[in-house]
Amino acid sequence: MKLQIIIKAAIASVGLLFLSMPQHAEAQIVPIAWFSVGAQEGDVTYAVGARALGLGAGLGVGPDNAVGVDLLKFLRLPVLSLYSGIGYYTRQKGIALSGGVQVSARDNVFVGVGYNSVRGVNGQLGIKF
């Protein structure tokens, strides 16, 4: 229980830090989309997402078929992008906090790993348009 509170507080703190950082002039205008698969409470979880201009959104399915939407803020670095966000899920799952990293693997492909307090740890595969 304490570990979950610490993780949620850390994700929220990093998210607030991201929101206060200025955007680069060459911010990504072209959308980037991804698919993720993860696990939480012994269930497989899924999500799809997209981002542009340092902001993103994801639609996910968690344990007990809880469906939710996450709003994400990205910090773009040369090879990787860090993100943090908040969302809401049905089936009495409530507010979800998330965070993670996406790393460029090739010109138009990237991989990532993230954590969502409802959907758990997840792996991501995406494409840059």
Image (tube, rainbow, N blue to C red):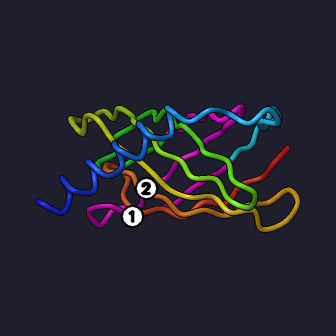
Which residue carries the number 1 mark?
A: 39
Which residue carries the number 2 mark?
A: 45
In the picture provided, is 99 more to the left or to the right than 3?
Answer: right
Residue 125 image offset from top left, x and y in percent: 67, 60
Label count reads 2
Label 1, label 2: how far apart the Cα atoms are: 5 Å
In the picture provided, is 85 more to the left or to the right than 10?
Answer: right
Q: In which quarter of the image is the C terminus?
A: top right
Residue at position x 88%, y 60% in the image = 107
Residue 42 image offset from top left, x and y in percent: 29, 67
93 up-or-down from 127: above or below: above
Nearer the observer, 90 or 102 = 102
How packed mark 2 is, by other alpha carbons closer than 10 Å (few <14, some 14-19, many 20 or more), is: many
Residue at position x 32%, y 61% in the image = 40
Residue lying at the far left in this picture: please name it: 1
The residue segment tinted magenta is 34-59
Whether the magenta-drawn stretch holds residue 50 is answered as yes
